[in-house]
Amino acid sequence: MLTNLQARDVETLVHPYTNLVAVRETGPLILERGKGVWVHDVDGKPYLEGMAGLWCTALGYGNEELVEAAAAQMRKLPFTHIFGGKSHDPAIELAEKLKEMAPVPISKVFFTSSGSEANDTQMKLVWYMNNALGRPKKKKIISRMRAYHGVTIASASLTGLAGNHNDFDLPIAGVRHTTCPHYYRLAEAGETEEDFATRLAADLEALIIAEGPETVAAFIAEPVLGAGGVIVPPKSYYPKIEAVLKKYDVFFIGDEVITGFGRLGTAFGCEALEMKPNSISIAKALSSAYQPIGGVMIPEDMYQAMLQESSKLGSFGHGYTYSGHPVAAAVAVKTLEIYERESIFERVRAKIPQFDARRAALEDHPLVGEARGAGLVGAVELVADKKTKQQFDPKLGLAAKCVAFCQEEGLILRNVFGDAITICPPLVISPAEIDELFDRLTRALDKTLDWAV
Ligand code: PLP
């Protein structure tokens, strides 16, 4: 029986990423307030937010400094744009800070309101650049199976998940997907991680050759694949991939929308994984999700090509009303200030051994085939048979059931791909709360086991 608020919800809202039929029966979980890593529903029940919302509320809930930064900017100048040569202090300060923090040489920053818009922009900038450089055929973008890069027409095409393509008539032309670096599922018998990485680099090279290197413009990768099930590539994967990209003059786009700003214990995920992209997409933890803001960090050679092309055309014809929104930018500036002042990334590094140990211990559970992750992000993959790695019948909806048991236990997690359950708490989670998270997840796994047998 739906509550009044739930009934009003299902009569009025279309929920993103939701079984639209089932939610009409069950109604949504309606949350009301939050503090630290905890959120409360309308009945006052507390939940540990084990996903930091959608991998984004890095500083947790109820951060008054961020609230004040937004309020102060709203009072001063709630909106002005940065089109046509206008600007404002928060956007300038934010771009300066990002340039200082950048893990690879970055010249300029272009702001968006989301990660999808950032990756859309990346694709357009690569096309624009290659037109400027006089190579109009070099336009294809290679992504990876199980990658997640967003949901706009271009970024959903880059995403390598069937659920984002089916019946949306995607991907668009000119996007290809190479092998996913998931050793647990895709390694051949006897193959070491090193051999696996070598094979994946060879797969990428074969794809580039088959397409024609003169047609391949860019490769896009999240350092750790997030919504595809938290997949951490083998250590030598990125250096091997980068050698192929260099050989064929393929631009490397890094998607740091989840891994940017401390998730792996480093400012950017690429620093933790020996990955050296040319440009970087950011969003989510940039503002700890207190305001919608994303961006593209652009290298000098790309910027020079943009200058050249826009002088030819008379203008750089791209930009969103909310590019560099002053309130969002002011909140992001404050967020970066807090990360630095409170040594948030160093403190994440100190928490990783405990998080790793608790995550790894889950592999002893009868339902868990792999408990993987890096930094403060992880996933458990449920299997019917640990030896053969056989999956459960998808019709059972086992991981979704486990997530429902988590909710019963007062823990919010997500089921993102097959039977993978993801974990990505706010970076400010305490050691006691890390234990609480894994204790609750273990109880939910036990309930799932009882339910399944
Ligand atoms: N890129 C990555 C790696 C993401 O995880 C996401 C969202 O989860 C996106 C891009 C898309 O960001 P948004 O949902 O803000 O459009």
Image (cartoon, grey):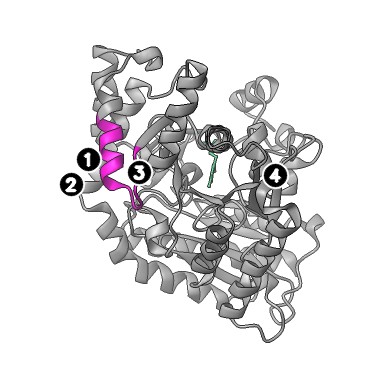
Q: CA distance from mark 4 to mark 1?
A: 38 Å
Farthest residue to the bottom: give it: 190
**Where is residue 251 shown, x and y percent of the image?**
53, 49
Q: Is residue 108 among what the camera can see?
A: yes
Mark 2 neighbour class, 10 Å CA radius: few under 14, some 14 to 19, many 20 or more: few
Amino acid at circle 4 = Val
Badge 4: residue crowd in 10 Å (few <14, some 14–19, many ≥20):
some
- In this view, the residue in front, 314 or 385, is 314
Identify the residue at image location x=54%, y=69%: 240
> Of the residues under marks 4 and 2, which one precedes in the sequence?
4
The reply to whether callout 4 and callout 1 are in contact (CB within 8 Å) is no
Residue at left offset 35%, top offset 43%: 106
Q: Which residue is mark 2?
A: 341
Q: Which residue is mark 1?
A: 337
Return the residue at label 4. Answer: 175
Residue 427 locus on image (x, y percent): 35, 52
Give the magenta-colored segment's residue range. 93-107
What residue does disc 3 label? 106
Measuring from the top left, give residue 209's x and y in whole percent: 71, 59
- Dot 3: few (<14), some (14–19), or many (≥20) neighbours within 10 Å? many
Q: Magenta stretch: dominant SS?
A: helix
Q: Earlier in the sequence, mark 3 or mark 4?
A: 3
Looking at the image, tell me whether mark 3 or mark 2 is earlier in sequence order. Answer: 3
Q: Quadrant of the C terminus?
A: bottom right
